[in-house]
Image (tube, rainbow, N blue to C red):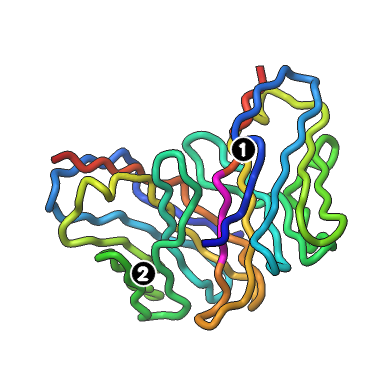
Amino acid sequence: GNSVTQMEGPVTLSEEAFLTINCTYTATGYPSLFWYVQYPGEGLQLLLKATKADDKGSNKGFEATYRKETTSFHLEKGSVQVSDSAVYFCALSETGAGSYQLTFGKGTKLSVIP
Amino acid sequence: EAEVAQSPRYKITEKSQAVAFWCDPISGHATLYWYRQILGQGPELLVQFQDESVVDDSQLPKDRFSAERLKGVDSTLKIQPAELGDSAMYLCASSSPGHSGEKLFFGSGTQLSVL
């Protein structure tokens, strides 16, 4: 079956530090890959996505590249801010067009301190 | 901006009692999902609806859980009887095709505590 493994947290960084959250996946086909973010007290929000190999998703300074050869989709940001403190989830969807049956990783909690 | 509405926000119940959660998806969204998020874990799909029909409920514990979307709009997820292990965040999401591909929107969830 499908699975997503992401680095365990929590991760604590100082403001303006470089962020990497590792994510690897197992899938039988060619999944779409996602990063979702959950701010305290809020629902999940899509941060970025990539639908095929070598695609780069980007949003709000975050980036992730779909690496089929290493089955990875690592999240990076060059300079984090306090407002980036949240839980980040890597996810995949292997169902066909018209469906969003997501398989999530366990989440990585990021805390950014001033 | 349109949102997926869920209620209640919090629910505390005793084991063996019945509980129900409600979800109102974004208007016009035909596909609706219920996910369960146990503390420290990622969300897991329970059931998917397309309009009023169940598309996938393979992960729904049907001995105690039921879900319906009678008119293809809002949906109710019920647990009867609740067990201690059901304590979790229950998330509803809806989706509809968009110009840049299908978009999925999550509600803020219902936090269930079973005592």
Q: Residues within 10 Å of mark 1 (few under 14, many from 20)?
A: many
Quadrant hosting residue B106: bottom right
Q: Which residue position is annotated with label 2?
A: A70
Q: Say left or right for B57 vs A17.
A: right
Residue B23: x and y, percent? 70, 48
- Identify whether B87 is placed above or below A17: above
* Residue at left offset 13%, top offset 52%: A17
Count residues near mark 2 (Cα–Cα under 10 Å), then give few for <14, some for 14-19, many for 20+.
few
Q: Against A98, is A76 above or below?
A: above
Judge from the rendering whether residue B101 lies leftward or rightward of residue A13; answer left or right. Answer: right
Tell me the chain of label 1: B
The amino acid type of the residue labelled 1 equals Thr
Q: How many marks?
A: 2
Q: Quadrant of the C terminus of chain A?
A: top left
Q: Is B75 part of what is drawn in magenta? A: no
Position in image of residue B34 (x %, y %):
68, 50
Label 1: which secondary element: strand
Q: Whole-percent x and y of residue A26?
A: 50, 62
Residue A82: quarter of image? top left
What span is in magenta? B104-108
Q: Amino acid at mark 2?
A: Thr
- Does the stretch in magenta take in B106? yes
Q: Which mark is residue A24?
A: none
Q: Which residue is mark 1?
A: B110
Residue depicted at 76% across the width and 54% down the height: B74
The image shows residue A104 at horizontal and vertical percentages of: 51, 54
**Which SS class for mark 2?**
loop
- Residue at 38% across, 73% down: A66
Outermost residue, front direction?
B1
Q: Nearer the viewer, mark 1 or mark 2?
A: 1
Q: Residue at x 62, y 56 (%)?
A: B93
Q: Nearer the viewer, residue B7 or A57?
A: B7
